Amino acid sequence: MRKTMMLAFATLLLTVCSSEQEKRSGPADPAASAETVNMLAGLKAATEKGIMFGHQDDLAYGIGWFYPGGESDVKKVTGDYPAVYGMDLGDIEHRAAVNLDAVPFEHMKTFVSEIWSRGGVITFSWHADNPLTGGDAWDVTSDKVVASVLPGGQNNDKFREWLDNLAEFLGSLRDESGVAIPVIFRPWHEHTGSWFWWGQRLCTDEEFISLWRYTFDYLCREKDLHNLLFAYSSSGNITGKAQYLERYPGDDYVDLVGFDYYQMPADGNKSFIEEVDRVTGIVSEVATEHGKIAALTEAGYEGIPDSKWWTGTLWPAVKNHNISYLLVWRNAHNKPGHFYAPWPGHLSEKDFIDFYNMPETLFQKELTEMGIYK
Ligand code: BMA
């Protein structure tokens, strides 16, 4: 009798411990789909192999072309696609046909299927308009916006409608057999800066955390979406772990931790390397301590006016830490000089090929071989 009880107790203990373990290593959404669970595991495995290269709007347009006129500036230079493809959902809240940079949402759906079928990683940011003033994401004229969308606020109904529109899009990302395609969703980004209506000086810590949790709960619980990994990503002005975590919504709401950092012409390469290295160190430590994945969620040097930037500056800035990916911003079709990846004939083309050939950098072909969704 005692023996049986002890055995039962030991089994119970083992079950509790292993489910705790599973909880810590699985996605924040406890009902995440099998594909999403695999994606998270695949991202972790890829992080052990190297750092994935990402590019915003890679398939939508580039220098001198707009979909369907071309394919990918990264592919034109290296013969391969990036491993991570960023897209932005700004204006999906209004059920618009095109996003804030004129990319049709229907095209994005095509890109998502294409990327999924070759085993790439998809990440969405959301430059949502200001629901209180009617301005854009950069309208910081009021510090009451976040409060206005939360329950009890005058814009809560409107915000729920916006989330409905967002959810409809995210839920429509399916493969030919109807499987929901897993993606990384990175809302409310650069929140430690004060240039978006959800930024540092525009709401309190509590309001920001409520906004995050509300978004998460609405999408995963009310709308039953289970194909999302959530990325929490600050701006580059990080002083330490405590500050980085001030607005952290909790381990149950986040899968990836990251930050955005751009080199400005006034900064030297040295300062970019030192700062990115320092903040990457902080974010990587947070990732390890919280069982999350670290990433440089946005980076770049506008126009890349440095022929050796890739191997001489970007690589030394990230090489000391175990991060999953770095994503450079878009090669704009509508803003001359606003580009962050090289294109055929650009002065950093050769150096980018060297960066591509480094064993530590991962692009699409390596990811396809690895099969991160298996
Ligand atoms: C910014 C710029 C803008 C763009 C926005 C959203 O950094 O590239 O031109 O509209 O991102 O993609």
Image (cartoon, rainbow, N blue to C red):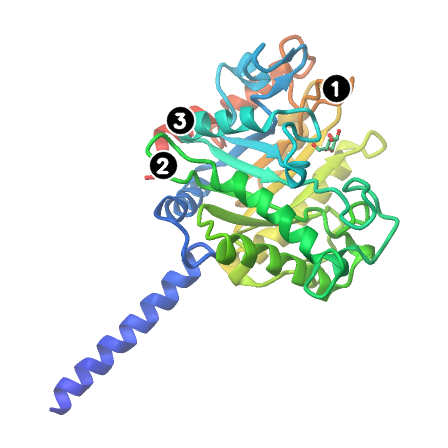
Residue 118 is marked as: 3
What residue would you read off at disc 2?
178
The quadrant holding residue 138 is top right
Q: Distance between the residues labelled 2 and 1?
A: 35 Å
Q: Along the polypeptide, which appears first: circle 1 or circle 3?
A: 3
From the viewer's perspective, is the residue at label 1 or at label 3 nearer? Answer: 1
- Tag 1 or tag 2, which sits nearer the N-term? 2
Q: Is mark 2 on a helix, strand or loop?
A: loop
Crowding near the residue tagged with mark 1, few <14, some 14–19, many ≥20 C-alpha atoms within 10 Å: few
**Residue 258 is at least partly visible in this image:** no
Amino acid type, callout 3? Arg
Extreme-left residue of the structure:
1
Q: Is residue 108 left or right of residue 233?
A: left
Query: Dot 1 lies on which element?
Result: loop
Residue found 57% across the figure and 19% down from its top: 74
Question: Image height check: is 176 above or below 129?
Answer: above
Residue 99 x, y percent position in the rendering:
66, 30
Question: Could you tell me the amino acid type at mark 2?
Answer: Gly
Image position of 25 (left or right of 239): left
Q: In this view, does 106 lie above or below 130?
A: above
Taking the view exactly as shown, the residue that stands out farthest to the right is 141
Q: Which of 307 and 242 is in front in this view?
A: 242
Q: Which amino acid does label 1 sit on?
A: Asn
Q: Residues within 10 Å of mark 2 (few under 14, many from 20)?
A: few
Between disc 2 and disc 3, the foreground one is 2
Which mark identifies residue 50? none
